[in-house]
Amino acid sequence: MKTREIYAEMRYIPPVVLRAVGRNIKNTLSGLGFEKPYDKTFARAMADTAELFIKKSGLSPLFAYTFSDEIIFLFTYPPFDGRVEKIDSVVASFLGSALTIKLRPEESIAFDSRLVALQKEEIPEYFHWRQLEAGCNFVASWGYYALRNEGMGKNEAAKYLRRKKESEIPKFKSEEGIPFLEKLINRN
């Protein structure tokens, strides 16, 4: 029967990035009263969870990067002899458990994870891409909730923002008290 474990022998060669993303996290956390679009308590809990993983998991990633409901770890040596199935499942379950304990929602928090195989010279490019994604995520979320606060419905706000470039999202910059957003929006 052991041969039926079809991914048990799949292995990776470091360096590798493991990206874990909260699964259905918006709905799971909806009853906790977090501020939207971003909440300091949630952001701190995500950072604490990443730090706890680095300190207590025994897997020793080189570092972690987190934004929104995503935590990324860089591994320069292969935990579990590089077994993909093992690292994916252990990291996702550790993060879900740790964040659930930290925030105490009514339902358990779950993460999915995936490995990204990189060459050493591709590591900066990967993290640059994730930082750009964080910026896009920020602008879109800020725009969505600004439209909602102006009275637009959920579907209407989402439809309005669909397929818009960052520079086309309404001005939620200096007048909203976020002057640095100007640079982020106009970086294209």
Image: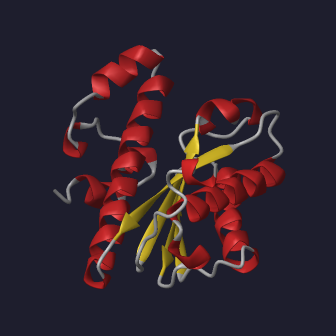
Q: Is 119 located above or below residue 131 in the figure? A: below
Give 178 or 168, whichever is nearer the viewer. Answer: 168
Query: x%, y% of residue 124?
Result: 31, 78
Query: x%, y% of residue 152?
Result: 43, 17
State the residue at coordinates (46%, 63%).
Answer: 10
Q: Quadrant of the C terminus?
A: bottom left
Toward the left, the furthest residue is 188
State the residue at coordinates (69%, 36%).
Answer: 29
Q: Is 30 located above or below residue 4 in the figure? A: above
Query: x%, y% of residue 140?
Result: 37, 40
Which color mode does the image show? Answer: secondary structure
Give 106 or 96, whichever is nearer the viewer. Answer: 96
Residue 165, picture quadrant: top left
Query: Is residue 109 toward the left or the right of residue 22 in the image?
Result: right
- Answer yes or no: is residue 69 visible: no
Residue 25, picture quadrant: top right
State the residue at coordinates (38%, 22%).
Answer: 157
Residue 32, picture quadrant: top right
Q: Is 171 located above or below residue 13 in the figure? A: above
Give 139 or 151, whichever is nearer the viewer. Answer: 139
Query: Is residue 104 toward the left or the right of residue 4 in the image?
Result: right
